[in-house]
Amino acid sequence: MKRVVVDPVTRIEGHLRIEIMVDEETGQVKDALSAGTMWRGIELIVRNRDPRDVWAFTQRICGVCTSIHALASLRAVEDALEITIPKNANYIRNIMYGSLQVHDHVVHFYHLHALDWVSPVEALKADPVATAALANKILEKYGVLNEFMPDFLGHRAYPKKFPKATPGYFREFQKKIKKLVESGQLGIFAAHWWDHPDYQMLPPEVHLIGIAHYLNMLDVQRELFIPQVVFGGKNPHPHYIVGGVNCSISMDDMNAPVNAERLAVVEDAIYTQVESTDFFYIPDILAIADIYLNQHNWFYGGGLSKKRVIGYGDYPDEPYTGIKNGDYHKKILWHSNGVVEDFYKGVEKAKFYNLEGKDFTDPEQIQEFVTHSWYKYPDETKGLHPWDGITEPNYTGPKEGTKTHWKYLDENGKYSWIKAPRWRGKACEVGPLARYIIVYTKVKQGHIKPTWVDELIVNQIDTVSKILNLPPEKWLPTTVGRTIARALEAQMSAHTNLYWMKKLYDNIKAGDTSVANMEKWDPSTWPKEAKGVGLTEAPRGALGHWVIIKDGKVANYQCVVPTTWNGSPKDPKGQHGAFEESMIDTKVKVPEKPLEVLRGIHSFDPCLACSTHLYNEKGEEIASVRVQ
Ligand code: NFE
Ligand code: MG
């Protein structure tokens, strides 16, 4: 057995350490641990504050998915105080949310995950003429999803922005890569295991397509986020307000925050989102996936997604009054709320459990455990529902600077700053893959009358299954499937933004320019005590904020965040979190360079700032290998 430590894992948000125990003969990972190595305590900072301010604090949980914590917080406070936001605010919040999804997913794939699949070194071996021919072939074969993608505005026809692939395009990018490699200073491409045998699994032309698009998307990505800037004033950390949004609308006033001209700018950004996902992200990932799955039989990393996934649902079509009373789930277009078990057995055999309304207030359903986390509970064999949640740090690990510092994680004791959320005591995976599995199961088993968003998702999954010639239960719950699901979700979100734009235009045309409901702004209108829950589907998975308001102030606040679910350590029953399970479901070719495992971890798009909601323990090594 070899024990391999990677600390810190790079190309993620925040500070993550992983340890794997590898059987050297077979390369099978036998056991694995993941640890969040920092802590901040935003949940404590918002205590005793005015609940109308909390969205601005919680948004600082993360510099990546910032606005999603504002959204969850607004929803929690509005749920507690029974505030219904105006139609325009609902559509605008949905566009800001959808834009976050597209931006976050595109940047994750190209800039955090792509180098697990494609290499600049291999890209130099490609012929630009052959690469252009292949890129156009890829677009034809894997771009077929575009045929059923709806365009609710019909304002722009392809290809206005992105020209067909040409040899010149690839030659230019190849020159840039060559300069970097020849200088001996790889810059943004430094410190990767470029000699790993897995990079030989793709032809050089695919590598060049991937790296060229990596560089191209560095430029395009900022355009994807323009809606945040128009509606929220800036990015990161756009502005909101309890009761709605705070960008007033006046179509023909040149100086209004939202007018005809600025909406045209938003619309243009949304079409750029559509083109980036339809013509780059989807074909690129499907081309790589097809080769990995069908030519190399590479089905690793499913882990917990095979056993159990959870989601909360999102995209309220119209304003709702209350989440915990069930109105939110009556209004949503995206029915990813629920739990699905055993999807790997096939969609007919998978087990489905619904989650809505009062399920989120039930103390037995969602709980957090701290048996293996650096926090203190009165009884650590039991979990706590977020309304009863306690955040009391209790670091028991080795001290910085001492000899034993970070030698090994203490798997029998506490070993992470991440708590362990569980559903009815059971470990679950969250994220795009979870959401896609849940919608697919609900529609195919007939649990819901599908909306157009649900149908679109089923159509995407069935089309990809046809292209890959594999049933969903085979390709979805894998590392590759997790990465495909994120791309499909980005494409769905981009096209959904066109739908919200249409609704926004129509509503404004009908004479409604209201953006905020201020009826309950004054705390004297509030009950003495109120409790709320705010739900959303953050880019990395199901996100919930739970608030208790007493005498106009926050009495308790708990965030249960996607990477807290996925990156959780073990619980009292010894169940691993999703990162750990995915590592155990993987084989590595070179134990001291576990690229396959990193690829699996990256496929979750980990965010440690969110999950530990930062005191930085300095690791002593970047990557180290120890033999047991
Ligand atoms: Ni910091 Fe986050 C997302 C949240 S953590 S990125 O998405 O919530 O998983
Ligand atoms: Mg928390």
Image (spheres, rainbow, N blue to C red):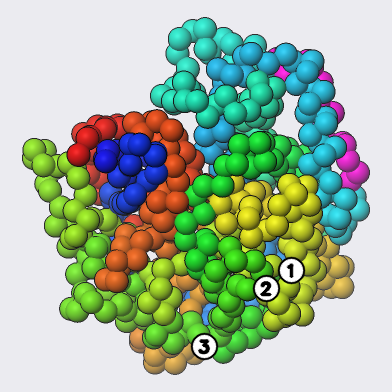
Give the residues drawn in magenta, as a range.
156-172
Compared to residue 148, the image places residue 162 above or below, namely: above
Q: Between marks 2 and 1, how big is the CA–CA gap?
A: 17 Å
Q: Which mark is residue 358?
A: 3
Q: Is any atom of residue 16 visible in this view? A: no
Position of residue 63 in the picture relative to residue 133 (left or right): left
Q: Quadrant of the C terminus?
A: top left
Position of residue 14 in the picture relative to residue 302 (left or right): left
Identity, as a three-letter code, of the amino acid under mark 1: Asp
Tell me the residue that label 1 is attached to: 454
Tell me the residue that label 2 is attached to: 348
Compared to residue 359, the image places residue 190 above or below, namely: above
Q: Which of 443 and 472 is in front in this view?
A: 472
Of badges 3 and 1, the one in the foreground is 1
Position of residue 246 in the picture relative to residue 305 (left or right): right
Tell me residue 556's x, y (percent).
33, 77
Label located before the other in sequence (2 or 1): 2
